[in-house]
Image: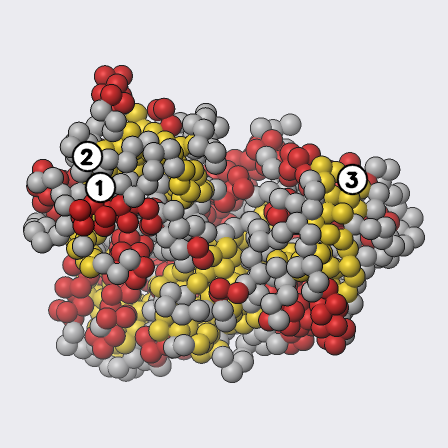
Amino acid sequence: MRFAVIVFPGTWSDYDCHYVLTSILGQEADLVWHRQTDLAGYDCVVLPGGFSYGDYLRPGAIARFSPVMEAVVKHAQAGRPVIGICNGFQILCEAGLLPGALLRNEHLQYRCQWVHLRVEVCHNPFTVACSPGQVLRMPISHGEGRYYADPETLDSLKREGRIVFRYCDPKGEVTRQANPNGSLENIAGIVNREGNVLGMMPHPERACEALLGGEDGLFIWRSLLRWAGSC
Amino acid sequence: MDRERLLEAIALTRAEYQLIVQRLGRHPNEVELGMFGALWSEHCGYKHSKVLLRRLPSQAPWVAVGRGEENAGVVRVGQGWCAALKVESHNHPSAIEPYQGAATGVGGIVRDILAMGARPLAILDSLRFGPLSHPRNRYLFAGVVGGIGGYGNCLGIPTVGGELYFEEAYSHNPLVNALCMGILPEERLVRARAQGEGNTLMLVGAGTGRDGIHGASGLASRTDPTGRFEELRPAVQVGDPFLEKLLVEACLDLAWNHPQWMVGIQDLGAAGLTAACVEAAARGGAGVEVDIARVPRREEGMTPYEVMLSESQERMLIIVRQGYEEQVGRLFQRWEIPWAIIGKVTGDGLIRVKDGPYEVACLPISILTDPPIYEGAGDMPPEVAAARAMDMASLPSPEDPAATLLALLASPNICSRRWVYQQYDQSVLNNTVVEAGADAAVLRIKGTPLALAIATDGNGRYCYLDPQVGGAMAVAEAARNVICLGARPLAITDGLNFGSPERPHVYWHMEGVIDGMAQACRALGIPVVSGNVSLYNETGGQAVYPTPVVGLMGLIEDVYRIPRPGSAKPGDEVYLLGPGPALPPQSLGGSELLAVMGLAPRGRPQLDLQLEDRVQKAALAAMKEGIVRTAHDCSEGGLAVALAELCLREGLGLEAPPLDLGPYPHASLFGEAPSRILLVTPPGAGDKLKALAQACGAPITYLGRLGGSALRLGPIALPLGSMAQAYEGAIERALQGP
């Protein structure tokens, strides 16, 4: 599979995503500078974490106007997979590819810690290698990860099975205590209506080696590979 | 500004002014005097510390760049890789504006590492504040932690460790020392040298503004920062981590992919453009010519004086090889970073500053970089003599050792630092093998089995009571910390924080600490490859505790075989390597127990460097044999706290058989004798471990077996739950105020 890892000024998970995709998973991946306007030939687009444009104004608010975003939208509209992680999720919301917004964490602090996620649905390119209810462990690292959407949007996300990950405890219980940022209904990741655009706050690319504390992030990347293989 | 007021603003003495006139053979103009003020400041010129710093060993076969040579020290770590290391203080700015003070401290140290051509791999922060019972200390603490996170998180460099102490002595003068470690391929090492006549000086990064003028001279080289709060606030710089992130990527693109395009990279830090040009020229043995009319500004109407002394952040000076200006300019443009050609390297040994057609300064580099050196005279403060002389044997012993242990675990100097480090990104860059909260952080080097362990250490209370022993203990403990993760100590960067060196009582501490560190470095074979000195940390004649921050980097040969925190299993055996468990009452000297009992520091810490060396060698030998599951250093709070921390970390209780705690059980439980490491071995490995320790000449004692959910040690029996309750959340509770 061929991945485009988009690099905005201020992106910092680009190397981590690129490293995991190439060195650990043996896939083809390019670091694509945000001024590039053509993403033809890529199977999957990754919008990595970081502080694009320093998060100045609002996370993702400036990056959504980057030249590359038109191509990202086109890629998404063609039904090809787009995964936005952390700042990438924020950019996808700002660009209107995903509904809702990511607000300042409820406790007003940045938070970097390992969290548990319950996989809610598995019929999309990002979790097809998981089983429903499976608990994944990976780090979060953000100051603005509190997912918010208006009641109608939230309702449709639930009805349409578009909530992909919820913060949970190690046993898979979705509790108030397991919610690290005050996200609505413990939401950690959602997909668009078509299911080919995922936004998630946790960092699967930081959980791909036992040496670094866990390998559960591989489930996300392997899902993408399996989905591509079955298409 | 008239000359007297200018001298006051830049903190030069009349005698120093006379010296300038004598060496120049004329009076300097205002711009030139400002440049002298910056480079002859204590902060840049090391006037009161240079003589003492020479006593620290800085060479070893693996050292590539030693102390004082460049922006940071560099050591070879193997497989073609080098590691760069440097610590820097930002105490005075943080006392005035904690968020920006700490943030720009991080920014500055990262640029120092970058100037070596190294990719910054990790940040650590060593912090000291007054007690959190005081609202201003809470404000300073929260602001500093916020600033470190705000800057480091945005940069995408993990913040993986450091230290945190609260003592009254730091109430008016918090200490904020930031450390950065980076890695680079050996052949990509960059020197910050302006050499080769005709080569081009290119300024890249932020526009130059009026922020931070007199930061090095007026702010960092004087006492009583908070007393002149409003007046000095403009001397604190404001950071833009986003631009710094771009600078990091662009400079590494240049240094790693196009090294032939340039001859050097120099950070603009303290004393801004002046220090950057002069230091680079001094290293290159050349001269420079700068036209400040070409320096991009962010404010209008700036005078030459302001441009030369601005400490605006996120700027680097690139010494471009003649003929490659266009390529280098394009590279920075590609990263969307402003750049400008501002001058060239000359052969006359002078710095000539022009403002368009007019020359505004012309000074010999050799005079600017040769400030007067002062050798102080030390005198032991009488209160130290009195505190040392106090009888330790007659101290009352705590009635309830279990309650005492809980009080120690909840003490701000010992409790969990989670509140701090969970606000820092610790894992970006995918190298963090062991995160903050362990004895040391561990960062792997991708594509190799190598990893670097790093820790900081420095107990000001010990140094106050006995500077030599305290200085040596800082080195010894930092070494033990990295050894606990299976690393061989490789190099030190030292941040030295003291009051005014012009006072004999402070100088006595300063000299003692440096001598103690030097002794320990020699005994343990560890070179000091870089460092920073911050003086005048005092208010109203009250100096901070003499506080060395020893940042120590160790090398791990095989990261897949390290003793990892959290890997112990029920039934594993716990051994105490080093003296004890029975200790004499002298081991309580300067201890946290005394602080928890509400007693002023007293006694005198002790250290046997030969024993320390044997213990460290024994621990490493046991780890090499693969019989150590995990390890933990025994330090503040003594054996009881170390065992409690081990139990909490591993999620297992400890069942200790009756131990001989000697005639002073409270000293044995809570005394802070150094040279001790807790080793956890799988069942059955004990005999081998004991034989190894004995062969190294290190004492070893079996303490007990891990299992269950309570710590049982002599008179103490405590469930893990109640220890966790005391240990976790103590900072949050303290932040809520009394």
Q: CA distance from mark 1 to mark 3?
A: 53 Å
Q: Nearer the viewer, residue B579 or B407?
A: B579
Residues at badges 1 and 2 in contact (C-beta under 8 Å)? yes
Query: What residue is disc 1 on?
Result: A125
In the rendered view, how is the structure colored? Answer: secondary structure
Q: Which residue is mark 3?
A: B717
In which image quadrant can residue B547 be found? Answer: bottom right
Callout 1 crowding tier (Cα within 10 Å): few <14, some 14–19, many ≥20:
many
User: Which callout, 1 or 2, points at the residue further toward the start of the chain?
Assistant: 1
For image coordinates 78% across by 67% down, the residue present is: B699
Quote the CA–CA distance across marks 1 and 2. 8 Å
Which disc number belongs to residue B306? none
Residue B359 is left or right of residue B642, and the answer is left
* B367 to A118, vertically: above or below: below
Residue type marked 3: Ala
| Foreground label between 3 and 2 | 2
Label 3: which secondary element:
strand
Q: Position of residue B432 (x, y in %)?
A: 44, 56
User: Mark 2 belongs to which amino acid?
Assistant: Gly
Check disc 2 and report the residue beneath it: A195
Q: Dot 3, how many residues are within 10 Å of its Cα: few (below 14), some (14-19), or many (20+)?
A: some
